[in-house]
């Protein structure tokens, strides 16, 4: 049975739209609230110095640390199950401003119009809005899903979280990753309904739940 | 093949009928006419100098049928895309659009403006990155308690 979407019903425009991402203000949990949120899939971190295989996570050109990393390991592997030595999958985050001017809008939207059709654009990227309170991450950026590494939980925690991703945005990242990995275009409400089901039935779930995240309440 | 706007279209490859038969000839030499239509693709059938019909090879008929289906799909895609481009033009937001670039080549926007527009304007994605078809999938939530087994007993360095 497909669960109800919950109290916060999507708008008609959202229901009929393939839009990939939320508006910029919908990406990140507010600075005041983010300590209530445990580390999860989708959270943005400062870059640890090296991967578990010893790769230094620095730019090839100038040796400066990567702009950031986004956690891609399942949330349950970053919570109570995680040990300091646990390997967490992360993807490199790249600043939008470093990209060619004409490529930037297509990275932001995840689609582009050509010949009257709307095509997927840069499927290996996930656009991230800037984090308003972060000096180094205030502007737009994106995840490069082609460049993933594993870092230890201890190193990731020590590097620190830039921002916690909202539950709504996590749905968008899962959906985009589904397309990148398997070329399945799934609707946002389907992914959200599955997340709602998973969250509702996870007795180990910690932190604030999404408004749509308890299908048992009806 | 998928047609693009500006392509000459499938009818450009459709040569006019190169031969004609009277209905009497068709009746008398049906086998020959059917053989001939394999190479000529289509023949005009006349009756007292009036065109009464066409004899068309199965391949040509299928080509025409599939062309009509594809052109109708393109028409629907363009019709669905135009409101998006017009909304962006009205809002002054430089979305990634060839059509918009032709209309307003100097238009530029901040990342936040593009992201806000993209999140709120209905969009229908119809093709993959290279114009290939899309696999649209449905997910069906499986409601049930999440039980995760302890997997620490696996030897993952074997």
Image: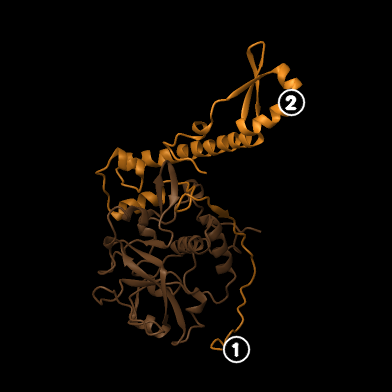
Chain colours: A brown, B orange
Q: Are marks 1 and 2 in contact (CB under 8 Å)?
A: no
Left or right, A162 with respect to A200, comes to left
Please, is residue B49 above or below residue B40 in the view?
A: above
Circle 2 — which element?
Answer: helix
Chain letter behind tag 2 = B
Q: Which residue is mark 2?
A: B30
| Residue at left offset 28%, top offset 74% | A60
CA–CA distance in space, label 1 to label 2: 77 Å
Q: Is there any visible trace of residue B91 in the rendered image?
A: no
Chain letter behind tag 1 = B
How packed mark 1 is, by other alpha carbons closer than 10 Å (few <14, some 14-19, many 20 or more), is few
Pick out the residue farthest to the right: B28
Quadrant in which the N terminus of chain A is drawn: bottom right
Same subunit: marks 1 and 2: yes
Looking at the image, which is closer to me, A213 or B107? B107
Q: Quadrant of residue A203?
A: bottom right
Q: Which residue is mark 1?
A: B153
Looking at the image, which is closer to me, B29 or B125? B29
Q: Nearer the viewer, mark 1 or mark 2?
A: 2
Q: Is there any visible trace of residue A173 in the rendered image?
A: yes
Please, is residue A54 above or below residue A32 in the view?
A: below
Quadrant in which the C terminus of chain A is drawn: bottom right
| Residue at left offset 48%, top offset 52% | B128
């Amino acid at each position: 049975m497909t669960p109800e979407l919950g109290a916060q019903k999507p708008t008609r425009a959202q229901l009929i739209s393939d839009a990939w991402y939320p508006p910029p203000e919908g990406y990140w949990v507010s600075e005041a609230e983010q300590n209530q949120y445990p580390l999860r899939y989708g959270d943005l971190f400062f870059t640890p110095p090296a991967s578990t295989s010893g790769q230094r996570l620095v730019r090839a050109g100038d040796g400066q640390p990567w702009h950031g990393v986004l956690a891609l390991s399942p949330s349950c592997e970053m919570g109570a199950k995680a040990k300091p030595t646990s390997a967490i999958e992360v993807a490199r985050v790249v600043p939008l401003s470093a990209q060619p001017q004409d490529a930037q809008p297509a990275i932001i939207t995840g689609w582009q119009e050509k010949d009257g059709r709307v095509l997927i654009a840069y499927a290996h990227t996930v656009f991230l809005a800037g984090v308003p309170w972060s000096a180094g991450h205030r502007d737009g950026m994106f995840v490069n899903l082609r460049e993933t590494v594993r870092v230890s939980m201890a190193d990731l925690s020590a590097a620190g979280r830039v921002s916690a991703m909202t539950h709504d945005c996590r749905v968008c990242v899962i959906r985009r990753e589904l397309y990148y990995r398997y070329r399945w275009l799934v609707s946002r409400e389907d992914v959200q309904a599955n997340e709602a089901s998973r969250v509702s039935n996870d007795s180990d779930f910690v932190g604030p739940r999404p408004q749509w995240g308890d299908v048992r309440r009806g | 093949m998928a047609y693009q706007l500006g392509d000459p279209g499938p009818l450009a490859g459709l040569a006019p009928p190169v031969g004609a038969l009277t209905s009497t000839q068709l009746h008398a030499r049906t086998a020959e006419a059917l053989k001939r239509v394999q190479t000529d693709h289509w023949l005009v059938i006349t009756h007292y100098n009036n065109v009464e019909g066409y004899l068309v090879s199965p391949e040509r008929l299928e080509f025409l049928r599939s062309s009509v289906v594809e052109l109708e799909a393109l028409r629907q895609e363009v019709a669905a895309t135009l409101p998006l481009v017009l909304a962006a033009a009205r809002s002054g937001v430089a979305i990634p659009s060839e059509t918009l670039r032709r209309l307003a080549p100097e238009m530029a926007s901040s990342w936040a403006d593009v992201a806000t527009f993209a999140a709120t304007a209905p969009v229908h994605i119809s093709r993959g990155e290279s114009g290939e078809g899309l696999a649209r999938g449905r997910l069906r939530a499986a409601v049930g308690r999440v039980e995760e087994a302890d997997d620490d007993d696996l030897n993952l360095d074997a």
